[in-house]
Each structure stands twice: as C-alpha cells, then as structure tokens.
Amino acid sequence: MEFFQEFCAVISHSNLTETIHDIWVHSPKAAAAALPGQFVNIKVKGFFLRRPISICEVSSDALRLVFEERGEGTKALGGIMPGDGLDVLGPLGNRGFSTDKYESAILVGGGIGTPPLKFCRNSLNKSAAVLGFRNEAQVIMAGEFANVQVCTDDGSRGHHGNIKKPLEKFLKTGSYEAVFACGPKPMLRAVVALAEKYNVPVEISLEERMACGVGACLGCTCKTVVGNTASYPRVCKDGPVFDGKAAVLC
Ligand SMILES: Cc1cc2nc3c(=O)[nH]c(=O)nc-3n(C[C@H](O)[C@H](O)[C@H](O)COP(=O)(O)OP(=O)(O)OC[C@H]3O[C@@H](n4cnc5c(N)ncnc54)[C@H](O)[C@@H]3O)c2cc1C
Ligand code: FES
C-alpha cells in the first residue's frame, strides 16, 4: 500500500472529554488513499518515535483523528492548536475492515476503540453499533452511529454491563453480514466468541506497541493460527485489522 509523509495544518481541535481530543488535519494525499481501519503515524515534537493513531474518518482533503492522552507523547499532542503543523505518515496498514466486501455490519467499539468505526459506518450501506465505556463521562461519539446501543460498566448510561447482550441481540436478527470490532482484548475475545456462535465473519483491529510503523523493525508482531499453521504477522504492516477467528488474543 502506498503511504505519504505530509506536513499537515491542523484545521480544528475540540475536546470530546477532558483527555480525549478530536482534530481535523489537512492531509489530501492520505485522505484520498485511506481505508477504514488504517492509521497514521504522527511525529510529536520532542519525541523520537512516532505515535500511531487510527483514521477516524476522512473528507476530500482532510483526516479526522480522535486520541486519548495516555502518556507523555499524546499529552504533548493534545496541546496542538488550529494552524499548527503536524508531520503525518500514512495511511498505514495493509488492509482495513472489509467494507468493500460487506454491505452491512455490526460495529463494536470499546472506549477509545470507537473512533475508527466511524469510518466503517460511513462506508457501509447499513450498520448497527454497540459501544462500551466505563461510565457516562467517558462516552464519546455515540450520536455519530446508526442503531446504536451504548453500554456502561456502571449503568450510568444505556445498557448496564458489557457489550455481550446487546451484540447478541443484533446478531440474533440475522440482518448483518459481519462484525467489525476495535477495543481492549477481553472485549475482542467476547466479540469473536459471539460471532463464531452465530457463524458471522468477524474482523478485529489489534493494538500493539509500535516503533517504525512500516514493517521494518518487527516490534509489533502478533500471532495468528489458520488450521494447523501459526504465523506471526506485523500489526503495522499486515494489519492492524485481522480475521478475528485467526488472531490469537493472549
Ligand atoms: C494501530 C494503532 C491505532 C491506534 N489508534 C489510536 C486512536 O485512534 N486513538 C488513541 O487514542 N490511541 C490510539 N492508539 C494508541 C496510541 O498509539 C497510544 O496511546 C500512544 O502511542 C501512546 O503514546 P504516549 O506517548 O502517550 O504514551 P507512552 O507510554 O509514553 O508511549 C511510549 C511508546 O510506546 C508506544 N505506545 C504506548 N502505548 C501504546 C499503545 N497502546 N499502542 C501502540 N503503541 C503504544 C508509543 O508509540 C511510544 O513509542 C493506537 C495504537 C495503534 C497501534
Ligand atoms: S512497528 Fe516496526 S514492524 Fe511494526
């Protein structure tokens, strides 16, 4: 896949929560080439390694990126302002979610795993979404999805509990061809198990610590098993989206 290094102007910056930032950057080449599920690698001033952030959605010449402050790099990135420049490498990743293969899907997001699913929603004819968060204060982007069921661990909004019951409800309808998911590993395990139960194809986006982001350092391998054959693909270059039934989630 072709990717580009662009020096992008930040168009807008808003906050979805105190620590979750929502930015649009002018990045015409990456926006034209991007597929749902791909990511960009961002140079943060003062840090050697770039930070990988999923592409939340695209316009004709811009990328939307939604990121959470986790460590020093994303905290520094949170300080950028409209008009600032950003060094962006992307779109990265060999394949995204198969929105070209399926017309409908159930989108399952956990916390900061939600943003890349917006790009899927925009690319599908029909979708439902199950979005899980710790509590109401952490809920982001719920109004941006169709047929959405929000779940919170403490019951402060929507379904009280994890994503399993609402996901099963959508699966039982038999109205969706696939499940696309992004979020923490325990959630992904539950999503894959339910999709297998209903014999529905499932694709998951994996997150590993990354260095180069372009397949050169082997720092981000994961394990997949198809039949009796195990392989160790790179999340950055061969993913980050994998067949949920092949990925080993340990
Ligand atoms: C493919 C992919 C897509 C991602 N998309 C998003 C997104 O859309 N929004 C979002 O908020 N976060 C996303 N992340 C996680 C994000 O990259 C990390 O939170 C961020 O790199 C942490 O950097 P830091 O400097 O704040 O933390 P530090 O802990 O200071 O980072 C130190 C180093 O570890 C790496 N690192 C740390 N945590 C992670 C992690 N969880 N995954 C990968 N590398 C990590 C950093 O790149 C850096 O090299 C994504 C990660 C991957 C792999
Ligand atoms: S981060 Fe270097 S190979 Fe994936």
Image (tube, rainbow, N blue to C red):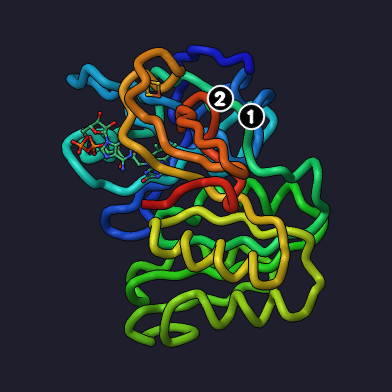
Q: Which residue is mark 1?
A: 34
Q: Is residue 12 above or below residue 159?
A: above
Q: Of marks 2 and 1, which one's residue comes earlier in the chain?
A: 1
Q: Residues within 10 Å of mark 2 (few under 14, many from 20)?
A: many
Instruction: Report, in whole angstroms, how far the alpha carbon at label 2 lies from the one at label 1.
Output: 5 Å
- Secondary structure of the residue carrying tag 2 is strand
Residue 139: x %, y % from top left: 41, 68
Tag 1: residue type? Answer: Ala
Q: Are marks 2 and 1 in contact (CB under 8 Å)?
A: yes
Badge 2 residue CB within 8 Å of ligand 1: no
Which quadrant of the rendered structure holds the N terminus? top right
Q: Which residue is mark 2?
A: 91
Nearer-the-camera pick, 116 or 88 = 116
Q: Is residue 194 above or below residue 54?
A: below
Nearer-the-camera pick, 197 or 150 = 197
The answer to which image quadrant residue 183 occupies is: bottom left
Q: Is residue 69 above or below residue 88?
A: below
Q: Residue at x 32, y 48 (%)?
A: 68
> In the displayed structure, does residue 155 sit left or right of residue 103?
left
For residue 148, say whether it is visible. Answer: yes
Tag 2: residue type? Answer: Pro
Residue 17: x %, y % from top left: 33, 60
Q: Residues within 10 Å of mark 1 (few under 14, many from 20)?
A: many
Q: Residue at x 40, y 61 (%)?
A: 111
Residue 198: x %, y % from top left: 70, 71
> In the displayed structure, does residue 20 sit left or right of residue 128?
left
> In the displayed structure, does residue 135 sit left or right of residue 178?
left
